[in-house]
Amino acid sequence: MSARYQYSRQLKELERHILDMGSMMEELLNSSIEALVDQNVELAEVTIEKDEDINNFAFDIEDRCVRLIATEQPVAKDLRLIHASLKIITDIERMADHGVDINKIAIRLANESYMKAIIDIPKMADIGLDMVRDALKAYVDKDVVLATDVCTRDDIVDNIYEDLFDELLEYMKVDSENIYQSTNFLLVAKYLERIADHATNICEWIIYIVTGEKKELN
């Protein structure tokens, strides 16, 4: 088995591990939204514990990247791939952290009678996770067109966030007893808005891998 084949296989394994980490994050975030909507404390607590698995996965990928740089001394596009991969796992890890924050809010609100139906928050989560899935697909396929398309969807999430912000502000103005819930829901919405931003960051790194140019698309 040639050294070049081994090296190519290691790069493919790196991509696969990043996809696996993204899937773990997606599962965590889905459970976080479910725990919030259903006011399920047990699910929230179990989901928080999964963040450690994602952190450990990130450490393992970091080690793989460092070993590749140290042993293979990659250049050009391969070096950009490894460098960008280190940045991408940081974005995924931070998304998982936001999922943990949402679970903590789910626990805080578990005994509250919700003042409104939770509709916009799951919608933001669905769009954000679609962005992440497509961003990771673009990462594997080195697809600049798809990466650019993902970035345009960030505006949709921003618009939902702004509308929800205005709506919750009105709830707070009408009745001061709504302030506690509204503030927590605004925090959740902000975390989801940030997840869409992290998906955009991943797409910027994909464009960097392919073209060598770092563009600000957020």
Image (spheres, helix red, strand yellow):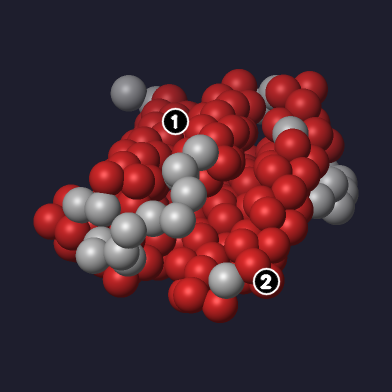
In the image, taking residue 151 as reference, residue 112 lies left or right, namely left
Question: CA gap, disc 2 to disc 1?
Answer: 54 Å
- In this rendered view, identify the residue nearer to me: 102 or 165: 165
Residue pictured at 27% horizontal, 45% vertical: 38
Measured as percent of width and height from the top left, residue 45 is found at: 18, 62
Residue pictured at 75% horizontal, 53% vertical: 162
Q: What's the amino acid at mark 2?
A: Lys
Kind of element beneath mark 1: helix
Give whichever of discs 2 and 1 has the lower sequence position. Answer: 1
Of badges 2 and 1, the one in the foreground is 2
Measured as percent of width and height from the top left, residue 87 is found at: 59, 57
Q: Specify whether residue 108 is in view.
A: yes
Q: Pointer 1: what residue? A: 12
- In this rendered view, identify the residue nearer to me: 54 or 75: 54
- In this rendered view, identify the residue nearer to me: 218 or 136: 218
Q: Pointer 2: what residue? A: 173
Residue 70 vertical position relative to residue 29 in the rendered view, above or below:
below
Kind of element beneath mark 2: helix
Residue pictured at 51% horizontal, 38% vertical: 119
In contact (CB < 8 Å): disc 2 and disc 1: no
Measured as percent of width and height from the top left, residue 1 is found at: 32, 23
Determine crowd level at label 1: few under 14, some 14-19, many 20+ residues with C-alpha closer than 10 A.
Answer: few
Determine crowd level at label 2: few under 14, some 14-19, many 20+ residues with C-alpha closer than 10 A.
Answer: few
Q: Specify whether residue 46 is in view.
A: no
Q: What's the amino acid at mark 1?
A: Lys
In the image, taking residue 47 as reference, residue 32 lies left or right, namely right
Q: Quadrant of residue 2?
A: top left
Farthest residue, direction front: 174
Counting labels gives: 2
Measured as percent of width and height from the top left, residue 127 is found at: 59, 33
Q: Quadrant of residue 26?
A: top left
- In this rendered view, identify the residue nearer to me: 112 or 36: 112
